[in-house]
Image (cartoon, rainbow, N blue to C red):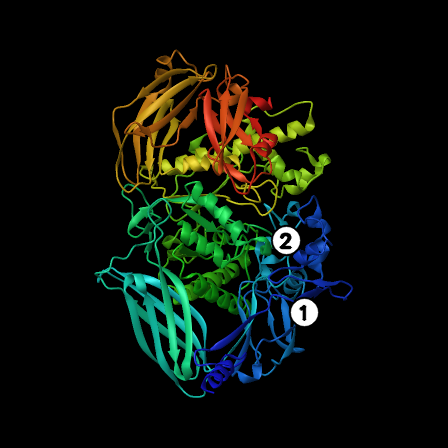
Amino acid sequence: MLLPLLLLLLQLLLAPGRAGPTAGARHCRLRDGWRVRNGNGSLELPAAVPGCVHGALLQRGLLQDPYYRFNDLDYRWISLENWTYSNEFKLPFDSSKWQKVNLTFEGVDTVAEIFFNNVSIGKTDNMFRRYSFDVTRLARDLNSLELRFQSAVLYAAQQSSARAGPPVPPACPPPQQHGECHVNLIRKEQCSFSWDWGPSFPTQGIWRDVHIEAFDICHLSHLTFSSVYDDTAQVWSVEIESVLDVISSKPVGGQVVVAIPKLQIQQAYSLKLQPGERVVELSVKINKNITVETWWPNGHGDQTGYNMTILFELDGGLRIEKSAKVYFRTVELVEEPIKGSPGLSFYFRINGFPIFLKGSNWIPADAFQERVTPDVLRLLLQSVVDANMNALRVWGGGIYEQDAFYELCDELGIMVWQDFMFASALYPANQAFLDSVRAEVAYQVRRLKPHPSVILWSGNNENEGLLAVNWFHVPLGDLETYIKDYVTLYAANIREVVLAGDKTRPFVPSSPSNGIETVAEGWVSRHPNSNQYGDVHFYDYDSDCWNWTVFPKARFVSEYGYQSWPSFSALEKVSEKEDWSYNSTFAYHRQHHLHGNEEMLRQAALHFRLPQGPDPVRTFRDTLFLTQVTQAQCIKTETEFYRRSRSEIVAGEGHTMGALYWQLNDIWPAPSWSSLEYGGKWKMLHYLARHFFHPLLPVGFEDRDVIYIHGVSDLHEDRNVTLTLTVHSWRSLQPQCAQTTEPLVVKAGAATRLYSEPVARLLSRCGNCTRPGCVLSFHLSAGGEVVSPVNYHFLSSLKDAEGLLKAHITATISQRGDTFAFDLETSAVAPFVWLDVGSIPGRFSDNGFLMTEKTRTVLFHPWAPTSKSDLQQSLRVTSLTDIY
């Protein structure tokens, strides 16, 4: 009889809803069974959670692709409706047997009232907060849950109408964005009301997970941690903060055990928790004699992390265990005087080593966040490191990204400059708004703090600059009020919450900003885009982008860019044949930047002939190609200028230590500043970025008819190299001349001048080459092997090139394991050789290159299964002369 009794006892202990000796809680995720209906109930359908209304309608076949043609306008009605999400569900446990039951929403988009079993339990008005509700007295076996949403567009308009005092500009976006108004009055993804690169899709829905938790005695509400290095004691520690909800009527005793096996850590701490919400702070010191491997940015070392478990063993047999990955790294934002220059430096030291930040700016990867899966993120972020980048700025008009984004950045070594979600606008400073923002910031800091990839908190995007120049032309009598509200929001609230929650990272109030100089000037600097302090944003579409003297010799350039169109294969999916013209209604509807289409052609025309031909579709395709050529060449020239400016001060300016171009990714298929199309396909810019962000790079430029070549290094040690310079005539695949220098030293973490010579003298000894007739290429070698990309320098505009022949390029494709080899052969020197396989997902090992040799092999890395025949059928090879 003993065995049956034991089995019965075991069944009773493990029955649903019964807290056994090691059970502390029951968790139920509410993903299934949701329905959504419109305001008058005329339309009701199943809904995915996480998800949004647009996604539900699309899933049921009630919408076309929202990105197709003019659907952003045609589907505007969706965001103007008030929708309701509802669910009926059985709990997989008996709620009456538990002391407390919580309902938690990880993300609600955005304005909703929540009803649990027909009782209103609370309201939401902030997309970026986590909301938790006590439903202990309401929960039963069968439950109903309803979220009655209000249109974010109508809510924002109501907020504006109800506001006392001066308005909060801007009221509406520019007309070419086809957007909605007053987005700055709602704590929602700012670009969801439109932006100059994106559509207006103000979503409604439950955009993150929903779950119910039942627990006894005590519940772990939050857990966060960070690693800290004590310079004086030369010892690492892990600082852990836990928030526990003690629902027992009497104190709860026990212990917490922290284990990091690989660092030989197993430490126990006694606990005595009083009833109520309790904060437990622990400092776990790592033995000095244990080697701790640090986390390094991509290109500078490994991204070592350690598995850590935190186990609470409390009275009543309660065990709460959490696992996490802990990383060790230090970050400093260095702002100090520079010899020979007024102002202060602005650069990052990681683990004590100065790092030049190379990268771009991240925007939301889709207007509908449920489509941004971890696979989508991995594809985009792998493209970041594949292009030799080490940093991304998460821009302040989008969202705080999902956990998978930061986990991937940790894994891949991508540093994250994290904006708070305020962008290009003024914002309210009334108490309700400030309270909501404080809760938002506290939650996001707690959530993101454990990630070593996050190296900086930044208050907003461009709002200090907008105030400094009075961009919105507010009455001068009101300007002081707006400045006061700005300081209240970013300095007295956001900064205060950040510093209370995280002392391991620097905080800057805005981007661009003058760093500590901005603070000294009362948080709004007179010139927040100064070259001598902080970071700079720079855009100039009128000047010649081949002329490096137009670019700012700033300390750090966190935004700069030029537009291009995506590939024809991207546009083909969302358009019709009548749209395939550069001047079509579709082309202008898709362009949300005023005069953007004209600016691209004007910049292209400075150095290239514009495509003209009898076939309008061919001309359209060729024009798309030329916008990508122009963008790539512009950003190449500008980025190389910033990289070579890291080690010099000229006329008091220089010491540049960051180049983050605008922008990395696209939110839909449209013209933009991106280097990755919607879906991840590489534009020509991204291929060139792989070269111009290489850790060892020769950079060529002219100054007063003298050619200079600098060696730029991100390496941690000096490198002995030789420089090879080759001059080609456009007419011939045979070099006019080539020379290799004596051994040279490229200094670690510096830009070193390697070569200079008057252009006329160089050309005269190379078969009497002329500027229009020849092109320079150069690379670095060590030990007989090429150790840098082959770079090039054009001696004249290519529209003036003499002897440039129409190149006939053939490609033979063969399979090599998981990759495909494209063996190319050309009949002539060919600039900007572009291989395009349409919609077949993948990337080439190189593309958009100057082909000066007769043959070349390029590899194609597919992102999905494909075949040689599919590639042969899809391949188009274009070089510059093909578009004339």
In the rendered image, the vertical position of residue 604 relative to residue 343, given as above or below: above
Q: List the residue tagged with mark 2.
A: 172
Give percent across and percent down for residue 692: 41, 35
In the rendered image, the vertical position of residue 871 relative to residue 296, given as above or below: above
Regarding residue 595, the answer to whether it shows in the image is no
Q: Which residue is drawn at 28% across and 39% down?
A: 748
Q: Residue at x 50, y 14 (%)?
A: 803
Q: Which kind of residue does numbered mark 2 sit on? A: Cys
Q: List the residue tagged with mark 1.
A: 86
Q: Earlier in the sequence, mark 1 or mark 2?
A: 1
Cα separation between marks 1 and 2: 33 Å
Q: Residue at x 64, y 73 (%)?
A: 89
Q: In which quarter of the image is the C terminus?
A: top right
Q: Which residue is drawn at 51% across and 19% down?
A: 800
Mark 2 element type: loop
Q: Are marks 1 and 2 in contact (CB under 8 Å)?
A: no
In the rendered image, the vertical position of residue 388 relative to residue 254, given as above or below: above
Front residue (pair 256, 499): 256
Q: Which kind of residue does numbered mark 1 sit on? A: Ser
Q: In this view, does 139 lie to the left or right of 358?
A: right
The quarter of the picture where residue 287 lies is bottom left
Front residue (pair 502, 857): 857
Mark 1 element type: strand
Q: Which residue extends farthest top?
A: 767
Question: How dense is the environment of label 2, judged by Cα within 10 Å: few (below 14), some, or many (20 and up)?
Answer: some
Q: Which residue extends farthest front?
A: 1
